[in-house]
């Protein structure tokens, strides 16, 4: 593929168009491929070039950049890949994960909840999201300006591609306002290379949800199944569920009814197959094995619990983030682990905190046996691990927390077991072929239940939705007495751990800065409250120092 910068230059737009001109050097897309594309060549094969430019948009959500190089100048490429960037900010300061590698100072610091405006991981996340917004806007503008020279028979295809880019841009703006609050906003109506105004959370929320509602309406009624690895109506509607679930945090105004309405649309579209006809995969880990593409929209299985999958099964899609991080980062380099997880390396970089482990049901005091299938890939006391975290580094890996692996680079069979007879794909030293899950139907069920508990619907439906999740996991069904917001928050933790939602969930529940402490929160083993301003991350100092943007309070 041609480099993104070359495409941008050919189209006459700035690579970091959302930034002020003085910030372009910090967020510039690196010139990787000497080949060039310019708009005058599009007429030679407009469909092929349009496909290629769209592919550049998608690839920016999977790896570091074109040809697996970083788009963020002077920054670790692996840390700035989309899924890894979110993991760093959504999981490491919470009760779910701790980065044990002291050599990664930015991540190790975040694990204690020490948040500063010069943290490189925060800069990497902000930069990744801003870059991806610019790429989406660039594609939409290229179509709308007629630069692809498309014949009439390609106009419908181009319109669908534009919808996809609007969805992907909305993904980024959801994360940006969630993490940073007030941020620069630009869409296809703003010329690239101009200064984007810094809008409030509420303003961006309103603009993006309006866009998504329009996109959903354009897709029309009924189930829409995009090609495998692409986004479509389900992701648009799932994003609306996320926006409306957090509306009170983002805007001060709840939108539980809208959250439930879009959640029920998705639930209705997927019901009829899978676990108890719910549309969920029969077994939890079918969403996280090397054949999880089969359970994604457009995949080979009739059950498509995975609404958005980020592929990692092609040479162009290799990444040190995504499922490679989720498997290698949580794993040792012992022969047993290399064989079981089907990997060529183990990084020993992050562990599940005791607070995560203790939320699961264990049948023995040693916490080695559980009826909950969601822990079956873990290493526990049965493997001589210790559910405590006194040292906070990986020098004594066995005695410093459980290995809470969620993903595996092996096929998951129809009965939910791990296929040890076949080896899917070539792993090499640092990559896996398992797809990374960006959104699942299970999340939608739990979000619907939460909206119902806030008065949006019938509690009997919420109970049914949560019990789909629990019964699939092999634990007892809840009674109505069990169903409350605190228990539901814990169930979200058990089902969605390490899926980059936890910080947002704790903030929405009022348990992020205070009201609930976990191990090493705010640098204390027993945990301590965060400062109130930690509800937002700071705008990176690299951006503030070179722009007129306003920093978040407290930083």
Image: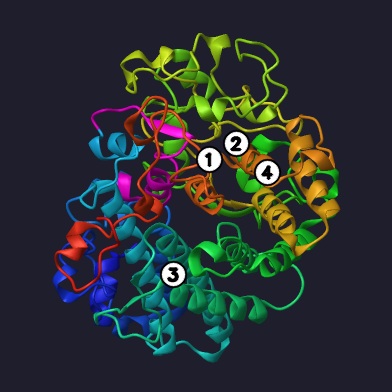
Q: Rounded to the nearest whole Å, what is the CA distance between mark 4 and mark 1?
A: 29 Å
Q: Residues within 10 Å of mark 4 (few under 14, many from 20)?
A: some
Is 421 on the left or on the right of 392, as rendered? right
Q: Residues within 10 Å of mark 1 (few under 14, many from 20)?
A: many
Q: Which mark is residue 54?
A: 3
Is 219 on the left or on the right of 395, as rendered? right
Q: Rounded to the nearest whole Å, what is the CA distance between mark 2 and mark 4?
A: 26 Å
The image shows residue 555, relative to residue 434, as above or below, that is below
The stretch of residues the image draws in magenta is: 79-103
Mark in the foreground, 3 or 4: 4
The residue where tag 1 is placed is 434
The image shows residue 337, relative to residue 83, as above or below, that is above
Front residue of 50 and 507: 507
Residue 426 in view of the camera: no
The residue where tag 4 is placed is 488
Is 319 on the left or on the right of 460, as rendered? left
From the image, which quarter does the N terminus lie in? bottom left
Quarter of the view holding residue 44: bottom left
Mark in the foreground, 4 or 1: 4
The residue where tag 2 is placed is 289
Pointer 2 or 4: first along the chain: 2
The x and y percentages for residue 204 are: 44, 74
Residue 182 in view of the camera: yes
Q: Are marks 1 and 3 in contact (CB under 8 Å)?
A: no
Mark in the foreground, 2 or 4: 4
Q: Is residue 102 magenta?
A: yes
Pointer 3 or 2: first along the chain: 3
Q: Are marks 4 and 1 in contact (CB under 8 Å)?
A: no
Q: Secondary structure at mark 3?
A: helix
Front residue of 103 and 290: 103
Q: Rounded to the nearest whole Å, what is the CA distance between mark 3 and mark 4?
A: 39 Å
Q: Rounded to the nearest whole Å, what is the CA distance between mark 1 and mark 3?
A: 22 Å
């Amino acid at each position: 593929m041609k480099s993104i910068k070359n495409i941008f230059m050919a189209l006459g737009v700035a690579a970091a168009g959302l930034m002020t001109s003085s910030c372009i050097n910090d967020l510039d897309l690196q010139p990787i491929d000497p080949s060039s594309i310019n708009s005058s060549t599009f007429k030679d094969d407009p469909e092929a070039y349009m496909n290629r430019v769209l592919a550049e948009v998608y690839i920016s959500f999977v790896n570091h950049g074109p040809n697996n190089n970083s788009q963020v100048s002077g920054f670790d490429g692996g840390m700035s890949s989309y899924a890894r960037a979110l993991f760093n900010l959504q999981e490491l300061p919470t009760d779910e994960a701790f980065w044990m590698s002291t050599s990664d100072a930015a991540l190790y610091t975040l694990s204690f909840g020490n948040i500063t405006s010069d943290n490189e991981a925060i800069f990497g996340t902000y930069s990744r999201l801003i870059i991806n917004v610019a790429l989406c806007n660039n594609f939409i503008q290229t179509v709308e300006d007629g630069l692809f020279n498309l014949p009439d028979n390609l106009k419908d295809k181009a319109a669908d591609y534009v919808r996809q880019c609007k969805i992907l841009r909305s993904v980024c703006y959801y994360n940006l306002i969630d993490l940073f609050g007030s941020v620069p906003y630009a869409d296809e109506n703003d010329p690239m290379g101009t200064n984007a105004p810094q809008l409030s959370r509420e303003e961006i929320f309103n603009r993006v949800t309006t866009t998504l509602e329009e996109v959903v309406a354009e897709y029309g009624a009924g189930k829409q199944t995009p090609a495998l690895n692409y986004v479509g109506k389900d992701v648009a509607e799932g994003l609306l569920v996320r926006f409306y679930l957090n509306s009170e945090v983002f805007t001060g105004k709840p939108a539980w009814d809208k959250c439930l309405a879009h959640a029920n649309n998705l639930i209705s579209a997927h019901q009829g197959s899978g676990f108890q006809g719910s549309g969920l995969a029969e077994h939890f880990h079918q969403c996280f094995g090397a054949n999880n593409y089969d359970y994604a929209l457009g995949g080979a299985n009739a059950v498509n619990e995975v609404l958005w999958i980020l592929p990692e099964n092609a040479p162009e899609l290799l990444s040190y983030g995504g499922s490679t991080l989720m498997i290698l980062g949580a794993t040792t380099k012992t022969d047993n682990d290399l064989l079981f997880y089907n990997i060529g390396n183990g990084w020993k970089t992050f562990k599940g905190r005791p607070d995560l482990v203790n939320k699961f049901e264990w049948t023995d005091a040693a916490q080695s046996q559980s009826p909950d299938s969601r822990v079956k890939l873990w290493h526990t006391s049965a493997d001589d691990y210790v559910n405590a975290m006194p040292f906070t580094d990986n020098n004594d890996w066995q005695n410093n927390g459980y290995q809470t692996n969620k993903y595996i680079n092996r096929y998951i069979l129809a009965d939910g077991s791990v296929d040890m007879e076949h080896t899917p794909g070539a792993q090499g030293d640092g990559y896996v072929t398992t797809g990374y899950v960006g959104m699942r139907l299970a999340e939608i069920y739990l979000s619907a239940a939460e909206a119902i508990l806030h008065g949006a619907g019938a509690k009997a439906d919420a109970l049914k939705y949560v019990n789909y999740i629990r019964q699939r996991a092999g634990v007892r069904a809840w009674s109505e007495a069990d169903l409350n917001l605190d228990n539901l928050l814990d169930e979200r933790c058990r089902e969605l751990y390490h899926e980059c939602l936890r910080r947002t969930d704790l903030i929405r529940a009022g348990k992020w800065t205070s009201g609930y402490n976990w191990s090493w929160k705010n640098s204390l083993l027993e945990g301590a409250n965060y400062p109130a301003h930690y509800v937002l991350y700071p705008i990176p100092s690299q951006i503030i120092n070179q722009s007129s943007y306003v920093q978040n309070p407290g930083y």
